Amino acid sequence: MEVWFHGTELYEVSSYYSLPDDAWQYELTGMSEADGHVAVVIPDATPDDGPFTPQPAHRVLVQVGGGQIPWPIFRRFIDLVESSGDLVGAGEDQPHNGGRGDRGIG
């Protein structure tokens, strides 16, 4: 667990393996009046076999609670999750995401 400061506001950052969810979870929670909450849940591809193996990034879930989180704190949180190495590319079951050209815009 870490505590981040933004002005007079405090934010708790934690990451842990959630057994009920069979997933690695990153959480950012406001500890003061702002009281916002964001969780990134990365499912385990092999929950019953060995160390945590992240499922492809398109299976990752983001949970958002009430309150507010300042952009610099949110950006720092996203940077933390991205730098963890737990967001991985997908195999053959990745949905097609070819960009704007495939949707007829841009």
Image: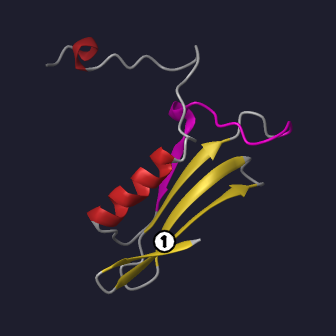
Front residue of 81/20: it is 81
Please name the residue that numbered disc 1 is placed on.
29
Vertical comparison of 96 with 21: above or below? above
Q: Is residue 51 left or right of residue 14?
A: right
Residue 45 location, x and y as percent? Answer: 71, 33
Q: How is the image coloured?
A: secondary structure
The kind of residue tagged 1 is Thr
Q: What's the residue at 53%, 45% (across, down)?
A: 61
Residue 68 location, x and y as percent? Answer: 33, 70
Residue 36 location, x and y as percent? Answer: 41, 71
Does the magenta-highlighted stretch encompass residue 75?
Answer: no
Magenta highlight range: 48-64
Residue 35 location, x and y as percent? Answer: 42, 77
Front residue of 98/11: it is 11
Q: How many marks?
A: 1
> Where, quadrant-wise, is the N terminus in this rendering?
bottom right
Q: What's the residue at 35%, 65% (across, down)?
A: 73
Say few, some or many: other residues with alpha carbon within 10 Å of mark 1 (under 14 / 14 to 19 / 20 or more).
many
Q: Is residue 103 left or right of residue 14?
A: left
Secondary structure under tag 1 reads strand
> Where, quadrant-wise, is the C terminus in this rendering?
top left
Does the magenta-highlighted stretch encompass residue 62?
Answer: yes
Vertical comparison of 41 with 66: above or below? above
Quarter occupied by residue 96: top left
Give the farthest residue toward the left. 106
